[in-house]
């Protein structure tokens, strides 16, 4: 798998990163172990997680697999702090105390002395930006993190953070796919100008771009479950469905899968350093790692962009 630099930094990560939001929830340890091995064997390098995923249990699961399935030196790990989820309620707190307390807890769960990239997971309008950035800087100076970034900031927030920080931010995480191109309006220009690499989450449109929801909602899928259906439903409406049909048509013409076409398009976009994929099962992981990830013919890419207007 291609290895890419993250923004203007010297950090190199795989074109696909392994997201772990489902770990310790939908994905048990046995499946997680198989998914991780499939990812590593396919050339993957970066594992992405967060303290908020399954209330920290996703990080603990990664920690339990380090050493047994893969050595710490074989992988890069990114995690995030500043957001907690408990009983379905989400709370944002990027104060210095919350961030650094969260980082120490993350390191303990992961069983490592440092993470490769540490992110402020969300913009917090109640906390001065300088205070949040001071926590990121302290993590870098103390060796707890090798690089720092921001997650789910919009364009002006990202530009301000990069301008105010007295140290280099190297990455920004945001949702980006053929079904969600809002990032192109302000965020992509902002992070490119600041020298940050974009790490795109939900690059398969929350699973919809695989084509598995064409004409039906499979049993066991996120859209079939009341707890996760709201996450998928916006991408099952008429306009997203027309994009999915266009992707499926392009895939058929190219002899590739819709999954491959969608990821290949995304990885050719300006500023994108890596796409964070989140397979919930070993079968999904194998399908993802089988993708060619080669640039689409220009006329195909333009046709898909015409159908999937930004916004």
Image: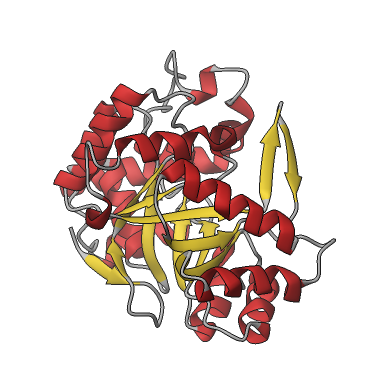
Q: Position of residue 75 (x, y in %)?
A: 27, 54
Q: Position of residue 130 (x, y in %)?
A: 74, 76
**Which quadrant is the C terminus positioned in?**
bottom right
Left or right, 239 with respect to 254, comes to right
Residue at 52% x, 42% y: name it.
240
When asked about the image quadrant of residue 126, the answer is bottom right
Q: Position of residue 15 (x, y in %)?
A: 28, 60
Q: Looking at this view, is 292 or 141 the one in front?
A: 141
Residue at 44% x, 13% y: name it.
219
Q: Is residue 21 above or below residue 75?
A: above
Residue at 37% x, 28% y: name it.
212
Q: Is residue 61 visible?
A: yes
Residue at 59% x, 72% y: name it.
138
Q: Position of residue 282 (x, y in %)?
A: 26, 28
Q: Is residue 94 visible?
A: no
Q: Is residue 97 above or below residue 84?
A: below
Q: Looking at this view, is 26 or 277 the one in front?
A: 26
Q: Looking at this view, is 74 or 149 the one in front?
A: 74
Q: Looking at this view, is 108 or 179 the one in front?
A: 108
Left or right, 34 with respect to 279, comes to left
**Which quadrant is the N terminus positioned in?**
bottom left
């Amino acid at each position: 798998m291609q290895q890419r630099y993250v923004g203007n930094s010297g950090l190199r990560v795989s074109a696909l990163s392994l997201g772990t939001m489902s770990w310790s929830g939908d994905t048990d340890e046995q499946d997680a172990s198989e998914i991780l091995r499939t990812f590593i064997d396919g050339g993957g390098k970066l594992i992405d997680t967060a303290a908020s995923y399954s209330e920290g249990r996703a990080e603990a699961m990664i920690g339990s697999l380090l050493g047994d399935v893969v050595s710490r030196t074989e992988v890069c790990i990114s995690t995030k702090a500043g957001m907690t989820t408990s009983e379905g309620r989400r709370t944002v707190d990027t104060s210095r105390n919350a961030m650094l307390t969260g980082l120490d807890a993350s390191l303990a769960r992961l069983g490592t002395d440092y993470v490769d990239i540490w992110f402020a997971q969300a913009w917090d309008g109640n906390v001065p930006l300088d205070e949040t950035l001071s926590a990121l800087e302290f993590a870098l100076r103390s060796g707890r993190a090798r690089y720092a970034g921001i997650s789910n900031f919009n364009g002006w927030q990202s530009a301000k953070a990069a301008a105010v920080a007295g140290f280099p931010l190297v990455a920004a995480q945001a949702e980006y796919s053929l079904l969600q191109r809002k990032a192109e309006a302000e965020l992509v220009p902002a992070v490119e100008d600041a020298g940050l690499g974009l790490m795109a989450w939900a690059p398969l449109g929350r699973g919809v771009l695989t084509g598995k929801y064409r004409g039906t909602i499979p049993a066991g899928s996120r859209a079939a479950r009341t707890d996760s259906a709201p996450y998928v439903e916006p991408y099952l409406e008429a306009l997203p469905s027309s994009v999915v049909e266009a992707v499926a048509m392009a895939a058929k013409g190219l002899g590739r899968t819709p999954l491959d076409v969608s990821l290949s398009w995304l990885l050719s976009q300006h500023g994108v350093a890596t796409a964070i994929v989140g397979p919930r099962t070993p079968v999904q992981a194998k399908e993802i790692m089988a993708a060619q990830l080669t640039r689409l013919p220009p006329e195909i890419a333009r046709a898909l962009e015409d159908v999937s207007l930004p916004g």
